[in-house]
Each structure stands twice: as C-alpha cells, then as structure tokens.
Image (tube, helix red, strand yellow):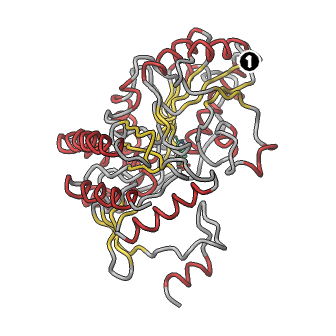
Amino acid sequence: MNLQERDRAVNWHPYTQMKTSGNAIPIIKGSGVYLFDNLGNKYIDAISSWWVTLHGHSHPYIAQKVSEQLNTLEQVIFAGFTHEPAIQLSENLLKLLPDNQEKVFYSDNGSTAVEVALKMCVQYAHHKTNKKSKILAFKNAYHGDTFGAMSVSARSIWTQPFNEMLFEVIFIDTPTFGNLEDLKSEIKSHQNEIICFIYEPLVQGAGGMLMYSAEDLDELMRFCREQKILMIQDEVFTGFGRTGKLFAADHLSEKPDIMCFSKGLTGGTMPMGITTCSDDIYNSFLSDDKYKTLFHGHSFTANPLACTAALASMELLLNEETQKNIQRISGQHCLFKKILKQLSNVENVRQTGTILAWEIKNNKETSYFNEIGKELYAELLSRGIIMRPLGNVIYLVPPYCITEEELNFIYKNILDVINSC
Ligand SMILES: *Cc1c(COP(=O)(O)O)cnc(C)c1O
C-alpha cells in the first residue's frame, strides 16, 4: 500500500468528510515556506499550516534548541515541580504583554487555553459569590472545539449536533456598524448576569477573517470595565505578530483581565496553550480554603520541549529581520489589496497586518460559494500554493520568512485564478 492508502485505512482527518474528500497529500519534508510531498512536488504554505508556522518549517534554530532540550529534560510533572524553560518563557512573555498580566497558566492548545480562561472567570465569580452566571461573546466568534470553547463560539454548522448541550451565551454584534450605543444598552440589560466577555481582538479568524477597529473595541472594553465585566482576550490567532504588532493588545489602550495564546506561540513547532491573568484574578484564588484551588491541569502542562520551542520562536520573532519582514508583508498586502479592489468579482477586501482577506462576489446561489472555495483550493494547489478558503472568503496568512518574490508569486497566481472564475 502507498502512503495515501495506508493513511485512508487508519486515519480520520480534522474538518474532513472522509467519504467525499480526496486522499490526503503525504508531506515528507518542510523547509522555510515550502512543503514537499512524496512525489517531489513543492508547495508554498500560504496559510502557515492553519495559522501556526511563523518562521517557516523545520526552522534550524528552533530545531537545535528543542533537540538540546530533548537531551536534557523532555517532560516533568508541573504540579510540585518546575523548570527553567517554563520560568524563562513566562518571564519573557509577560514582559511583552499589557502590564496588568501577572501570571501564566500552561495548557496544550488554543481550546484548552480558552477553557482555562473561562474556568478562571467562572470560579472568580463563584469566589465573589456574586451570582453572575452568563458569558458574553461576539456573533461569528470562534474560540475552539472543546465544549466550553464551542459554547462561547457562534452556533454554526460546526456546532449544530451539540447545540443543546452547549451552555447559554449572550451573543452581540461586533462593533462594526457604528452600533456601539446599541451594544452598550444590550450589555447593560444583562448587567448583573454577565461574568465575562470573551472576544477575538480585531480579527475574527475562523468566522471568516472578519475585522473591526481597535477604537471601537477599546470603547467596548472601557464599557465592560465600568460594568465590572471581566475580559478574556483570545489572541490564539492574533498573537505573535499576525496583526503587524506583536499582539492585538498593542493596538489597544484598554487592558483585558485574561489573555489566551497558542498557534504561533511555539512558532508552529509544538502544541502548547497559555492563559495569562491579572493579579486580581490570581489573588481571588489565594486562600486557606482548599476549595478555592484552580482544579485544572493537563498531563503535559508546561512541557519543557514546547516551552523551549516557544522561547526560540519568540527570540526569532523579536529580532530585527523578522520585524522588518512583518512590516514588509503588511506593505505588500496593502498594495495587493488595491489591485484586488479593482476586480469586479471581488468584494470586502480587508487587511490587518499580515492577514489579508476578501470575498468572491455573491452573484450565484448561496450554496455555490463553498464550491467556489473548493475550486480555488484545488486550482491553487495545482499551482503549488496551499490556501484554505473559508467558503467564499479567501485569505492569506503567510509565514514571516516568506520573501517578496514568493509573496508576489502567490499574488500573481491568485489573480490568474480569480480572473478565470
Ligand atoms: C484556532 C483558535 C482557537 C482554538 O485553538 P486550537 O489550538 O485549534 O484548539 C481558539 N481561538 C482562536 C481565536 C483560534 O483562532
């Protein structure tokens, strides 16, 4: 059996209808922006392998650091024990975050980072015995696939079979339409029920790369602060340079109580999630009462290899070359945006830093659009470019190591493909 047959015999792939999907492409090597399949084809990874890869695949510096750590300490229980990589990573990360972020809680991925954040808030309310029981979130939100994370995400085809088992959440519009006063009065009508507000800052990723302004979010955050509603800023996607600044937080003047990270955290090398919080949250768990413990943990909490990968990735992220690349990619996107805007079958072109998105125009039946996405996916793949449209939303989220020429190659092929559809 070849790799594809062996794969089909045993593997169940994520977000994949196994009956109708084609065979998965076996990748045997990654290097920089390129992935290589078993037949010798090479592909540009224009979506950073589901938005995680920051500095390219198999980055030699991260590989070297992880390999050294692998020979020193690969894993240790993080209850009762600690280690240098976790301490160093927490110290380094906190220095980059809003100054009210004081403590770091480790977990395994973006969804668990969100679960931990929600549990911190719900238990905080429990400690304060304030009888609040609701969570506030945005329509079109996506915060992950575990049950708590699904609950605070938009109800969609992805959550449909589980909807009755998800806890109730108050969903409001994003502040996009000059609607801030409406949003405020909606929040105010639930004033005494809302424990916390969870949101993807500036860009709603999986919901379709929907973007809204930092000024509007700031105002909404200010209002939540006044209403004593805790804020969870889910930077799982936006963190580590994606928005053109290190964090979406760097576009904002208001500070959240809790922040969630994953995806780019380890440069896309290893799975890890982080939830950071303020002293106010942390201190509410300090007690002689054992019941006030945060009873949450994962077997691989603060895995030393993942911490080491994150330390190495953050070092690369902060160096001048990467920072210049991020600005250059943002600039190139901005120019390409102007070209896209002139196309008759393209609409809603939008950009935040290294994230560029647009829609293929709605001039056919709605059900057609998913097909458009699939067609574009196949056509671009045949040209050696990996993209993954969300329905009729096409987007680019490239690794920061992509060169000017490589990005231009992607733009040119995209223009060819959308001009012919
Ligand atoms: C991807 C994502 C998550 C979930 O992360 P996983 O590692 O896939 O569980 C949570 N929040 C946001 C904003 C995301 O984009």
Q: Position of residue 83 (x, y in %)?
A: 41, 45
Q: Residue at x 34, y 77 (%)?
A: 41
- Apparent side of residue 321 relative to residue 344 in the rendered image (left or right): left
Q: Nearer the viewer, residue 230 or 355?
A: 355
Could you classify mark 1 by the number of other residues whose Cα lies within 10 Å: few (under 14), some (14-19), or many (20 or more)? some
The amino acid type, in three-letter code, at marker 1 is Glu
Q: Residue at x 68, y 12 (%)?
A: 188
The quarter of the displayed image where residue 244 is located: top left
Whether residue 318 is visible: no
Q: Which residue is mark 1?
A: 193
Q: Residue at x 50, y 37 (%)?
A: 210
Image quadrant where one finds the C terminus: bottom left
Query: As displayed, is residue 44 above or below residue 125?
Result: below
The quarter of the displayed image where residue 13 is located: bottom right
Q: Position of residue 265 (x, y in %)?
A: 40, 45
Q: Nearer the viewer, residue 396 or 350?
A: 350
Q: Residue furthest right?
A: 164
